[in-house]
Amino acid sequence: MTRTRIVCTIGPRSLDEEMLRQLRQAGMSVARLNGSHANLDWHRRAIAEIRRILPDVPILLDIPGRKIRTVQLAHEPEFAAGDTIILTTDQTHDGHRKVPVNYLDLHLDLKAGNTVLADDGTLRFTVTLVEGSDIHCRAETAGQLRSRKGINVPFVRLNTPQVTPRDEQMIAFAKETAVDFIGLSFVESAAHVEAFRGLIGASTPRIIAKVENQGGLDNVAEIVAAADAIMIDRGDLSVETSLHDVALRQKQVIEAASRHGRPVIVATEMLHTMILNPFPTKAEVSDITNAVIDGCAATMLSGETAVGQFPLETVSLMRSVVDAAEDFVQRQRDARQGAVAESVPDAISSAIPHLCRTLPITRIVAVTRSGFAARMIASHRPRQPILAVSDDAAAARSFNLIAGTTGIHSETPFPKASIDHIGQVLQRLWQDGYLADRDVVLVTGVTYPHKGSRMNTIQIHNVADLVAGLRWTRDT
């Protein structure tokens, strides 16, 4: 059982039954679909296939949101430094003379002298003239502007709406297909998160807020409090702010999220060279290691598993690097004392890793409807695996994003007037093979749960004693 999750983007290279099974075996914890690519019919088929083949794997659907991209082009222009490229909001063009973008008011927000970046900042342009719907740009770098590539305009405030008609369509699709998470691009406030939560109108899909510009950094405290999880999209973050301190920004966001027990996904180019090569660079290995040391819950692969030539090797390599980093972090953590907590749930979540270091605990069981207990325990990164049990199937599946945690659905609803369900949960875990007679298990949850209550109990059991004393059998 390893703690750090691996999010794999599923694309043409990996949407195959055998490949999906191999990716899961190699370490994939969450399947991601990039809503900026392909159409909804393709994504509907992909979701159905993932659900059929890997029903326990949560699905993250990234929705385009406020992300500006080039559209699908019939012609992808190549250019040299000094050449003129015309971007346009006129959708009748196809790339031969002008390159359309999906934000229809971009020409209203730009003026001569502005910088435009494309393809994660690898292409740089300077605006020389805005004429009607056309944006004339001088290429500062040579390259090729391809379909569906991101466009960034750093230090320019765009008047994009908080929720677009396309967003509404994608949310409806996410609800229809019952994905577990949606990824929101360019989140800049708690209000942005709440606007989408209002559209969802339910507890799922859960919201992963993507911090990828200065507005997101400025308001990171309120964003992590409002969202269910955070993604650090370092591609856009590095071009929207600055490249030289993106690693420091990563640490800043992870630290803020940790205070709220929110899982953080670190994304973008973690093993980018393995799209075409079977081996990574030393810098990429160091990058993954440092993300784990920073305290991320998950690392993410994008093109590496969606279209890369070595998807399985990439996941296996990432798992090996993550395992080594986790071992290092755990040895350091074991040598330190825990912090003083300010509330009962904080005290319990802090006490659990201490108990797990001083007693022969082999499993932690969090009986939790919403996932709060699992998130708080996982934020202290105990060595033992966490089994998070909920009577909400969608919630249980979403727990698989939390570091070191396996989400398990309880068919029996949790009562509010007794704690009988805790014993029933342990018996079911034993019957289903999650617990063995030799295990020493620490159990936490809420006694007599009601709305707004938090974990307030710890139990420690030798499973063999429970089996003998309560006369458990394998019969259901």
Image (tube, grey):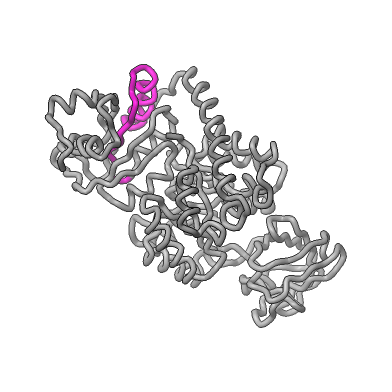
| Magenta region, residue range | 343-370
Residue 467 in sight here: yes
Residue 213 in sight here: no
For the C terminus, the quadrant is top left
> Viewer-proximal residue, 73 or 250?
73
Whether 368 is drawn above or below 132: the answer is: above
Whether 89 is drawn above or below 206: the answer is: below
103 left or right, relative to 458: right
> Viewer-proximal residue, 276 or 235?
276
- Residue 340 pos. (x, y %): 41, 23
Asked where in the image residue 433 lies, by quadrant, the reply is top left
- Asked if the stretch drawn in magenta spans residue 295, the answer is no
Could you tell me which residue is drawn at 34 percent across and 18 percent down?
359
- Residue 263 pos. (x, y %): 46, 42
102 left or right, relative to 432: right
Residue at the front extreme of this rendering? 18
- Residue 93 pos. (x, y %): 69, 80
